[in-house]
Amino acid sequence: MDVDLLRPGTVPISPDTILWFEFLLNEDLLKKHLSKPNPEPSPCDLIEEFLSVDTDNGNSKPTSERVVDVDAPPSPPSETTLTPLQFSLKELALKILALKVAATLHWNLDVLEAKLPPQIQQQLMQDLVYMASDSAFIIPPQEFSQDLLHKPQVQFALTLYHRWILRFPVKAALYAKSTKMSYMHVPGIQADSGYTPLNQNFEKILRMSELSRMNSIKYLEEILSYYELTPESRREPKKIKIPVMDAFVHLNEDSTDMNHDWNAGKIVINQYELAMQIHFDLCYNYFFYGQHDMAAKHILGCRENSNLLEREISLYGYGSHKVMPWGDFYYASVAKEDILGYIRALNLGSEVLNEEPSLLQKLQESIANHYAGLIAVLQADNLTKEIPMVHRQVVELDIQGSASSGAFTVARDLLNRVSALNAVRYALEGGLPSTHPDFLNKFKTVGIKFFDLLFWALAPVLMSKLSNDDWANLKMFFLHLATSQCRLPVERIDEYLKKHVGESAERIRKKLISDEELQTIINDPINSDDENMELPRELLTDDWDTPDFEIKTVPELEMGRLKKQLIEASTADDVRMCLVKLAKTAPSSPLWKLSPSWKPAGSLGNALTSLPRGFLQDFGYIVSGAARARAEAGCARTALSLLSVLEGEVRNQLGGGTDSTLYKLCRQLSWEVLLLQVNVMLSEWPHHRINLTALANKCKACIAAANSGDGIVPRPQVLEACWTCLVNACEWEGVVATTGPGEIAAALCAACFELQRGKATRKFPRPLWDIALSVYSNGSSGPIKRNASGMPSHSRDAPNASTEARNAFNAFLATLREPLAVSVMFSLLARIHNLLIDDSSLELVVEYTSLWPSTISNVNNYTNNIKYILESLTELLERSLKLYPYNTSWLRLYGDVEMCGGRWGAALRRYMCALAAGSWLFAKRAPDEGSVARRAARCCQALAAPTQAAALCQLPDEPDYTTAFKCLAEKTGNAADAMDAYYGCLWDGTLLEVCVALHARRGEGGRRARAVAAAGALELNANNSEDIQREAAATRRARLLRALTNQYVA
């Protein structure tokens, strides 16, 4: 290595190594180094090193401060007043060395932009202006005095600077498209020195260049007008002197000021070369911003000046060149291919170059004109194969998307014809149908018509001169297509070919598929017609008996078959028929003993076995057992139908008689039928088609029978079902408290009845409160559980008594269907939870909580069971919201429950659903929007989305500025937060001002500009009327809430 720019360390260095500061001491050393064929370091490496060397001068202006802050207030333009020297002689000497190196590169911006980091590029351009203006400006201002502009070196420096300004955004955008940035920086590996946001001050430079664009265009337009083509200039073009290496005078230890020799060197260019390059840079910028008319104007100007320069060179030469030295100009860096490329891209090829547009250009024109003439372009391309296949596939997908979305109307068969033409091109390139699934899908959706379109698209290709490879590819394509599962009419291939290619059909078909191959394909069973396939007779009938075989009846086998049918019977009529047939065989044992699964519910088994042996005993036992099995399997409606038939049979047997056994059986069956009716009502709610009033009257009669002291009483499960029916049927009036089965339901009926009364006469429903507290108590004071006979059970003294009590309570909650009863239980459990946690930030909010006491005695007896309260609430909420999914109060409560469990994402989803349901999908303001928004903002904070939380803080009537300011000041790496993308959802001027100030403090110019743009919206002006401000807030509020709903709910 000839030059070591690193500082000397402890390791001994070679005597031939030259240190960086030696270039300052020896004026000829730099020229000697750059004169080498391949100097190492390269010229651009030297520029970067010279401009990056740290200095000890505290008065020097750092690079970051020379980057113009475009968001700062504009300063008045400076005149000719010279700025005091702010660089040390050492810094100035290094800048001069960098400019010397740039001069050897002929000020080629293509090289400088490709090899130097953005901040070094800007510093180099600014240093050139600084030197050319005799230290007048450290940062080029927007306005210059005419005296300075008349100096050739100032004009040259400003022209180069403004050219760089126009080119920088384009280079940055192209670099961003062609480079995929890593999500993390690997230590020890330097990032590319090109246009990447990882570079320091990159965003400021980009914003500065974008906002200075029009000023730079104005300056370059003035330069072009100064060198405007006139008859006089055509005869004798103006000359422009290019600063060379010797123009920058080297500083030494005796220097006190800079005295550059701008007349040094003999490199001079004429105005054609300068105008050609400026026109091209303007076209380059206009084309990038989509201003194609202006881009066309300047590319024509570039073409005109290049022709004039070429004529000038042919007459007078260009140094040692007698022809245009593309790539070796003294100043211009434009390439001839780039000029021609922009001419063609701007659709000027036929006008300027007398060129026929290529098929790819015709394709793009067709797309721009809504696919006019597209078929002709694709047909021509099938013959020439110029357009890349990917462009054709993209066009097909665009047509498909446009047709499905209704963006514009296309011909009905355009998509199918384009698909067929693309399939032909795909086949010519050696593709196979199996590797093109979209092609096979066309056969499935369009049918045989697509086969005809395929030959229509193929006809021009088949009639052209194809190579042997093309014929081989087409042959292989058709063989694969014919043997695929598309069910193509291969036998009609001659007919299709004759239709589209005429008399040459047979000759062409033999090239595609020979006679032997065609016959083999046709005779393949897989291609046979399924409709004409002969099936064996045995497969078409249900008679599987062996013919001519004498069948002998065996009574034992017949009885076994009947018993099997009886066990498999699913309806009461099937059971009846089997019992009648079996009765003829005189079975020795009762038939109800055949299956152990026949177990009647409750005491029905004892009542049925007490009947005399016969049909009714077997029928009743089997049907009631089958009904019990169906009910346990969840088929309550089927079980009800079975047991109703049995009840009718028993009533018919009883008639007007006084048989006590049948009378007892009849009453028990009626209660079991009542139980099944309640179960059907619960399982099919709200579409049960049952008369609730009549069912409630039956339940009241059943409860009265249990309290009458009669010897025949319903079992506890029936009584609990009756009380559940009264709760869900809103039959709450006149209910008296009970201590047996249905105790909780009776207490809930009383609570619902009290809630309907006015506040003045309302009584506190203590029974339900005491029952709920006992369920979640740490001790053994749970509710008294009773056995099947209704007597107290001693199992509550066991260790699992608390678990059994909670299970029984949750089982009752699972039977609630009536909204008011469900809301009462929600309010009860929410009140208990709130009193136990004693934390206002985690309180559960739901209606009717004022019905319950505000204190609990002996709180320590319940604190360990808070999680069980949340479990009961979660299960009840899941079931209830399936029945009433738009109940906003319950959705809000579900969000509170999820928040108490630390499930922030689920809580936010419930809150957004509550707001959407209560505001017609945010078309209006929800009643409790402010309180829900506060909790939603807290969830966003927990999910590391502070900007979303800050936006939600606007929703309450009094915005929560404390939380919002805290969130905006927080920096997060969470991509889901979207940060400044939510500025369009802010309508509070205070929050927008804080955003602007925070971004300015962090030096985030781009984000600050977006915040300024959002705050400057006309509809947010404080002087607007209240209606306009309210409408602007409603629009942004809906936009915010819908965006959050799409993210967290959808």
Image: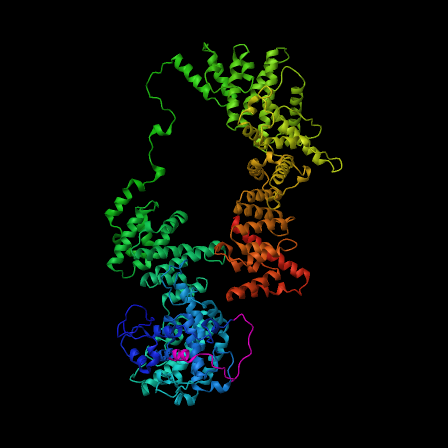
**Image location of residue 111, percent across then percent down:** 36, 73
Task: Please tell me in which quadrant of the rendered image residue 771 appears.
Answer: top right
Task: Please tell me in which quadrant of the rendered image residue 264 appears.
Answer: bottom left
355 falls in the magenta region: no
**Image location of residue 655, percent across then percent down:** 62, 13
Residue placed most toward the observer, 397 or 756: 756
**Image location of residue 275, percent across then percent down:** 41, 81
Residue placed most toward the observer, 569 or 358: 569
| Residue at figure coordinates x 68%, y 34% from the top left | 752
- Is residue 236 depicted above or below 600 in this figure? below
Q: Is residue 848 visible?
A: no
- Is residue 565 depicted above or below 819 in this figure? above
Q: Quadrant of the N terminus?
A: bottom left
- Is residue 8 depicted above or below 901 in this figure? below
77 falls in the magenta region: yes
- Is residue 423 depicted above or below 861 in this figure? below
Residue placed most toward the observer, 735 or 840: 840
Q: Is residue 374 visible?
A: yes
Q: How is the image coloured?
A: rainbow
> Residue placed farthest to the front in the image?
10
Q: Is residue 564 left or right of residue 743?
A: left
Counting every numbered tag in the picture gives 0
Residue placed most toward the observer, 319 or 202: 202
Question: Which residue range is magenta in the image?
Answer: 70-96
What main secondary structure does the magenta stretch of the protein show? loop
**Image location of residue 20, percent across then percent down:** 34, 75
Q: Is residue 284 left or right of residue 670?
A: left
